[in-house]
Image: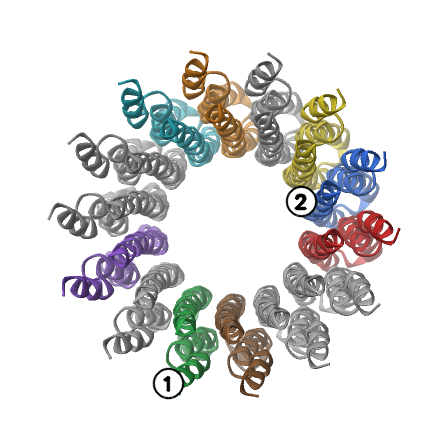
Chain colours: B brown, C green, F red, G purple, H blue, J yellow, M cyan, N orange
Amino acid sequence: MNELSLIAIASIISAGVTIGLGAIGPAIGEGLALANALRALAQQPDKANTITRTLFVGMAFVESTAIYCFVISIILIFANPFWNHFLNQAGG
Amino acid sequence: MNELSLIAIASIISAGVTIGLGAIGPAIGEGLALANALRALAQQPDKANTITRTLFVGMAFVESTAIYCFVISIILIFANPFWNHFLNQAGG
Amino acid sequence: MNELSLIAIASIISAGVTIGLGAIGPAIGEGLALANALRALAQQPDKANTITRTLFVGMAFVESTAIYCFVISIILIFANPFWNHFLNQAGG
Amino acid sequence: MNELSLIAIASIISAGVTIGLGAIGPAIGEGLALANALRALAQQPDKANTITRTLFVGMAFVESTAIYCFVISIILIFANPFWNHFLNQAGG
Amino acid sequence: MNELSLIAIASIISAGVTIGLGAIGPAIGEGLALANALRALAQQPDKANTITRTLFVGMAFVESTAIYCFVISIILIFANPFWNHFLNQAGG
Amino acid sequence: MNELSLIAIASIISAGVTIGLGAIGPAIGEGLALANALRALAQQPDKANTITRTLFVGMAFVESTAIYCFVISIILIFANPFWNHFLNQAGG
Amino acid sequence: MNELSLIAIASIISAGVTIGLGAIGPAIGEGLALANALRALAQQPDKANTITRTLFVGMAFVESTAIYCFVISIILIFANPFWNHFLNQAGG
Amino acid sequence: MNELSLIAIASIISAGVTIGLGAIGPAIGEGLALANALRALAQQPDKANTITRTLFVGMAFVESTAIYCFVISIILIFANPFWNHFLNQAGG
Amino acid sequence: MNELSLIAIASIISAGVTIGLGAIGPAIGEGLALANALRALAQQPDKANTITRTLFVGMAFVESTAIYCFVISIILIFANPFWNHFLNQAGG
Amino acid sequence: MNELSLIAIASIISAGVTIGLGAIGPAIGEGLALANALRALAQQPDKANTITRTLFVGMAFVESTAIYCFVISIILIFANPFWNHFLNQAGG
Amino acid sequence: MNELSLIAIASIISAGVTIGLGAIGPAIGEGLALANALRALAQQPDKANTITRTLFVGMAFVESTAIYCFVISIILIFANPFWNHFLNQAGG
Amino acid sequence: MNELSLIAIASIISAGVTIGLGAIGPAIGEGLALANALRALAQQPDKANTITRTLFVGMAFVESTAIYCFVISIILIFANPFWNHFLNQAGG
Amino acid sequence: MNELSLIAIASIISAGVTIGLGAIGPAIGEGLALANALRALAQQPDKANTITRTLFVGMAFVESTAIYCFVISIILIFANPFWNHFLNQAGG
Amino acid sequence: MNELSLIAIASIISAGVTIGLGAIGPAIGEGLALANALRALAQQPDKANTITRTLFVGMAFVESTAIYCFVISIILIFANPFWNHFLNQAGG
């Protein structure tokens, strides 16, 4: 049963590091985009609609890279195929 | 029962590192956005409503990456499926 | 009783690193925002109310990421579920 | 069966690190592009169509590098040929 | 009694690293804010009251992240629950 | 059969690190180019054709370095000559 | 008596690293503030009093983070509760 | 036959690291060049021919450093003289 | 007598690292301040007295963080309480 | 024959790291030069000949440092005197 | 006599690292100050006396942090109290 | 004969790292110089002779640091006195 | 005689690292100062004497930190008191 | 004879690292100086003599730190006193 615990430890550490590391880039990228959106708003307040629409569609792109990390992280915790395999084998 | 303690140690360290690492990006990104919001406010005080609304919606996007980390961190401490499995097995 | 001490050591180190690492981002982000708030104030002293209100609401957002770290850190020291489990077991 | 668990652990850690590391670049690159798109919009609001079209086609290029990482990450978890080989051998 | 000394060593190292690491961000953030406050003062000397009041309230926010680190550091040295537990047990 | 698993582990880790590390540069480089393309578009909207054509040809150059990494990564997973050699030998 | 020496070594290293690491941030932060104070002085020599007063009050804030580190460092050398405990026990 | 597998592992890791590390520089360098080419195009649209010709010849220079890495990487996988030597010896 | 030498080695390394690490921040901070003082002097030569007085008082603040490191370093070499304790014990 | 394989492993890793590390500097340096050449072309299109000639001669200088790395890398793989010595000795 | 050589090795490494690390900050800080002094001289050649006097007094401040490192380094080589203690003991 | 192989391995790794590390600085330095030479050419095309002459003499200075690394690297591979000593001894 | 060789190895490595690390700061600092001296010369060619005199006196200050490193490095190779002690003892 | 080979290995690695690390600073510093010399030349072509003379004297200063590293590197390879001592002893 030692294998099962090693898989669990690797999954716990990997899940944490994945989202911890993967949150740095998107957060800085979105902050950068938002900062410039606000400058653009102050410069062209009449085009607020176009600017905020482009901003939120663009931020969804950036957010997607954070979501990839979150998905992998959640898969490693709740739908880990390696864990399931060893669990079935241990239970078989 | 040695496995249980290893899972616990991995969860404790991973939970801490996840949120510790994951707070750097969002905090800097939000600070950057807020800094530019204030400059935009000083430049276009008449559009304060549009600017602050865009700011807080955008910061919610950025905050979301910090919340992903917090969620993973809380899951690892309070709803860790690996820990629960070994606990049930130890208690069974 | 060796497990109990390992959990304690992991909690102590993780609690320290979490808040030590997690204080870097928010502090720099808030400093950045505050710096621009003061420039905005000097530029538009008539709008001091709007600027400082936006500043403090925004800083509460940024502070929230530091508070996530602090919460995890305090949980690991005073409400650690893994520690409590092993303590109950040792005491049982 | 020890080999199987080592392959699993290597796959779990590698999958996490790949997407965690690979999300930093695209997120910052897309944030940078989006930030300048918004500035360009504020400067030339009449050309909003050309700008947003170029932006989203360009971001698809940048996103592609994140998707390479995601693909490798998913392959390592769900379609890992090394894991399959050892699984077949263990089951044979 | 070996456990007690390991807890002590972990607490000593963690207390030092926590405040050593946690002082970097706030100090740079406060220096940044102070630097801009002085520029703002030179630009709008008539609003010195508003500027310095906003500065010191804002710096209290930034200082709070340093204080979180200091609090955790002091707790780990003088009110460490793990140390107290093992001390009571050793003394019991 | 121990050799086969070591080759597999090295291939899994190397494939992940290769594309994870290799995605940072191209993504930032393409983001940088895209950002300036949008500024150029805003400055010379009449030359949109020349600018976007040069942009996409140039981005293909940058993308090529990411593709080198992806190719090596895929070769290490699906067409690894070292793995094939040991597999043939084990099956021979 | 081996425990006592380990506590001593951990205290010595931790005390040094704490203040060595903790001096970087405040020194750069104060240098930054001082640099801008001098620029502000050159720009508004008539307000030298307000500027230098704000500067020195602000630098006391920044200095406080260095002093937290110094305090922890001195506590670890001269008033270390863990050391005192083991010393009393060894002497008892 | 142990030597053969060590050579294989070293080749796999080295091939991946070489191209993974070697893609960072060229990608950023080419992105930088492309970004300035687009600015130059916007500034001198009449000289588009000269600018794009110089750009692509120059990018071939930059690309060459990425190709050196790719060549070494491919040599290590498909034409590795050390591997061939040991293979011949093992087969001899 | 082995403990005494370990304490000595830890003190030697810690003393060196403390001042080596602690000299980076103050030197850069003071250089930054001095650089701006000279620019201010060139801009307002009539206020040389106020500028140089503020400069040297401010540099004393920055220098203080270097002196904290130097003090800890000297204490660890010449007035190390842990060393003295073990020396007395060895001599007793 | 163990020595021969160690030499081979060291050569493989060293060859990869040499060109992988050595490609970063020249690629960024050449990209920087190329970027400024294009700006210079846009500014002085009449001197395109002088500018591109100086650019390509200069880039050959920069390329030379990449070539030094490539040469050492190729020597380590195909003309390694240490490998040849041990090969002769093993064959002798 | 083994202790004596360990003290010697620690002193040699620590002395080198102390001054090697401690020379980075002061050199960059002094270079920065000198660079601005020369700009100030070019801007206000009539005040060369005041500027160079302030420069050299200020550089003495910066140099002092390098001298702290040099002093600790020389103490560790030529007046090391720990070495002297063990030397006396060995000779006694 | 074990010594001979250790010397060979150390020489191989050291030769690669020396030139790999030593190519970063010169390449970036030369790229920086070349970039400014081209800007200077665009600004003063009449002085192309003086500028390019100074550029190439200066680049020879910068190249010299890369050549020092290349020389040490080649010495370590083809004229290594330590290797020659042990070779003579082994052959003697 | 084993001690003597350990002292020698520590001295060799420490001497190399000291000057290798200690050359980075002074070289960059001097380059920075020289760069600004040349700009100052171009701006105020009439004051070439004052500028170059201040430059070379200032560079002697910066050079001094490199010389501290060189002195420690040479002392560790040619006048190492620890080596002399053990040499005398071995010869006694 | 084992000592002799350890001294040789330490010398080989140290010689390579010393010059590899020590070439980074001077090359970047000289490139920076050269870049500004060319800008100064373009700005004041009449003073080409003064500028290039100051440049080459200044670059000799910067080069000196690279030469310190080269000297230590060559001493460690060809005039290593530790190696000579052990060689004499082995030959004695």
Residue plotted at (43% across, 84% down) = C89
Q: CA distance from mark 1 to mark 2?
A: 59 Å
| Type of amino acid under label 1 | Gly
Would you say residue H34 is visible in this rendering? yes
Q: Which residue is mark 2?
A: H25
Q: Nearer the viewer, mark 1 or mark 2?
A: 1
Between residue J37 and residue M61, name the one nearer to us.
M61
Residue that sits furthest to the right in the current view: F92
Q: Badge 1 local density, few (<14 within 10 Å), some, or many (20+)?
A: few
Between residue H31 and residue F4, name the one nearer to us.
F4
Q: Which residue is mark 1?
A: C91
Would you say residue C42 is visible in this rendering? no
**Side (left or right) of G62 relative to C65:** left
Q: Is residue J9 above or below residue N62?
A: below
Q: Secondary structure at mark 2?
A: helix
**Side (left or right) of N49 relative to G3:** right
Q: Position of residue C75 (x, y in %)?
A: 42, 79
Q: Secondary structure at mark 1?
A: helix
Q: Position of residue B15 (x, y in %)?
A: 51, 73
**Side (left or right) of B88 relative to C9:** right
Image quadrant for the C terminus of chain N? top left
Chain letter for mark 2: H
In the picture, residue H73 is in which quadrant? top right
Chain letter for mark 1: C
